[in-house]
Image (cartoon, helix red, strand yellow):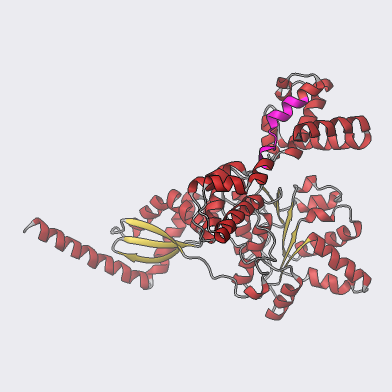
Amino acid sequence: MSAGLEAKQGEQRFQEETGAYEAGLAGDDYSEQWARVRGRLRADVGEAAFKSWLKPLTLVSLREGVVRMSVPSRFMRDWVSSNYADRLRGLWMEEFPQVRHVEIVVQPPARPQNPEKAPRAAEAPAAEAQGGGEAPEAAAGTRRSMPSSGTDDEAERCRDISAPLDPRFTFENFVVGKPNELAYAAAQRVAEADGVPFNPLFLYGGVGLGKTHLMHAIAWHIRTRTPSKRVIYLSAEKFMYQFVRALRTKDTMAFKEQFRSVDVLMIDDVQFIGGREATQEEFFHTFNTLVDNNRQLIISADKSPSDLEGVEERMRSRLGWGLVADIHPTTYELRLGILQSKAEQLSAPIPSKVLEFLAHKISSNVRELEGALNRIVAHATLVGRPVTLETTQELLADLLRASDRRVTIEEIQKRVAEHYNVRVSDMSSARRARAVARPRQVAMYLSKQMTARSLPEIGRKFGGRDHTTVMHAVRKVEELKATDNGFAEDVDMLRRMLEG
C-alpha cells in the first residue's frame, strides 16, 4: 500500500472516529464528560481561580480533533489561552484521545435590553479607568442569599429611582491589568453569584481608576442576567438628596421601604456622606437591614473604609466587613491596553507610536488618557489631517505640560530633606528620632497628596515601610496642620516649591 493511500485511509478513520465522538457529545454522555473535565480542572487550579477564570467556559464544538470553547471577553480568552489551554487539552484528551487542540473564542453575553434607560454619550459620566485576578473565597460563615421576591414591576420601579447606567461601562469594555485585577474579579463574582459571596463589596481607589465603570458593569450584568432582581444604583450624594426630600415631605417610611427592600443596593462615592450625621444614621440602619436579610451591598469610595473622614467608627467598621478591593494607579501596560481598546471602539486608525507616547506621558488617571485620545480622534476627523506624533504633541501641549510638572517621590524626599536639614538617606532609614521622623512624615504626606502612587508604593520608597505607616503619617501631618499654623505654612510652602 502506498504511503499516500495509507495516510488518506488513516485520515478517513480519524474523521470517522472524531465524528463518533462528536455524536457522543450531543447525547447523554455530554453532561457526564463535561462534568468530569470541569471537576478535574477545578481540583487542579483551585476554587478561586476556577470561579474567576474557568467557570464561564462553554463548550461550542468538537470537530476534526479541535475542541472549541467560548468565554465572554477578549481578556479572559487571552488569559485562559495563555495559562490553561495545555491543561484543558490534556483533560479533553483523557475523554477523547483524538483531541489535538483546544481553541478559546469570545462569545459575549447578551447586551442590556433597555438601552433607552441609559444616557446619551454626551450626558454620560466621563469614562473611568479600567480591571481580572483570582477573587478570594467568601468569608467563613457567609450565608446564601434568600431568593429574590421582586417582580418585574418592582424591578422597573427600582430602575426609575436609580441613576442612569452608561451603556459603555460593561465588563466586556473593562481593560484588566495587575492594578485592578482583584477589583474586577470580585465585581464579576458578585454580579454572577446567585447568593451573596461577600457583603459588602467595597471598591476604592483614586479618581479615574475604574470604580464607577465596575459599578455600572455589575448593575448591567445583574439586570441582564436576572431582570426581576431589584437593583438600585446611585451616588451617595443622590442618596442624601432622596433622604432629605423624604424628611421635608414627611415621607420617611416610603424612603425606608424603597431602599430596605431591594435585592442589590449600590452606592457610589460613599465618602460624600462624611460629616452628615442624619444621612449616616439612615444609611447605617439601611446597611444593617440589608445585611441581616442577606441582600447585596456594593460600595465605592476614594479611600479605604478605615481612612474615610467624617464617618462614624461603627460605620467604618461595617464597611470593612466584607471584601475591600483596592484599585491601584495604572501601569504603563494597562494604560496602553486601555488606549488600544478605546481606539478599537472608536474605529480610529491611531499609530502605535502615538498610543505608546500617550501611555508614557499621561499617567495620572484614565479620564485624562481617554480625553486626550478623544481630542486626537476629533481633530483628525474634523480637520482631516492624519494622526502623527508631531500633531499629537502640538494638539496636547497643555495636557503634556501639566503631566510634565508632576513630581516624583524622590524629588519630594530631596526637597523635604533640604528644608529640614536632614540627609535624604534618613527618609528610608530606621531612625525614629523626632528630628528625622517628622520630616519623613511630611514627605510621606506630600507623596500621598502630589503623586498618584498607592500607599504600599509610597511605603516601599521610604525604606519598605508598611502602608499603615504611611496612613499614620498622613493623619499626623493633617492633625498638626490643623493645630500649628507655623507647621501648616511650612508644609504649604514645600508644596508650592515642588509645584513650581
Assign the C terminus to one quadrant of the image. top right
- The quadrant in which residue 422 appears is top right
**Nearest the eye: 336 or 381:** 381
Membership of 414 in magenta stretch = yes
Describe residue 445's horizontal placement relative to residue 112 as left or right: right
Residue drawn where x is 70% and y is 61% of the image: 125
Does 155 sit above or below residue 449?
Answer: below
Could you say where residue 113 lies in the image, as x and y percent from the top left?
60, 75
Does 487 sit above or below residue 390?
Answer: above
Describe residue 292's horizontal placement relative to residue 410 as left or right: right
Does 277 sit above or below residue 306?
Answer: below
Describe residue 431's horizontal placement relative to residue 404 as left or right: right
Does 378 sit above or below residue 114?
Answer: above
Could you say where residue 127 lies in the image, as x and y percent from the top left?
65, 57
**Nearest the eye: 481 or 389:** 389
Assign the N terminus to one quadrant of the image. bottom left
Q: Is residue 249 visible?
A: yes
**Nearest the eye: 396 or 369:** 396
Residue drawn where x is 67% and y is 30% of the image: 461
Instruction: Give the magenta-colored segment's residue range.
Output: 403-416
- The quadrant in which residue 432 appears is top right
Could you say where residue 197 lies in the image, as x and y percent from the top left?
65, 58
Count the marks: 0
Describe residue 420's horizontal placement relative to residue 18 as left or right: right
Membership of 26 in magenta stretch = no
- Magenta residues: mostly which secondary structure? helix
Residue drawn where x is 10% and y is 61% of the image: 5
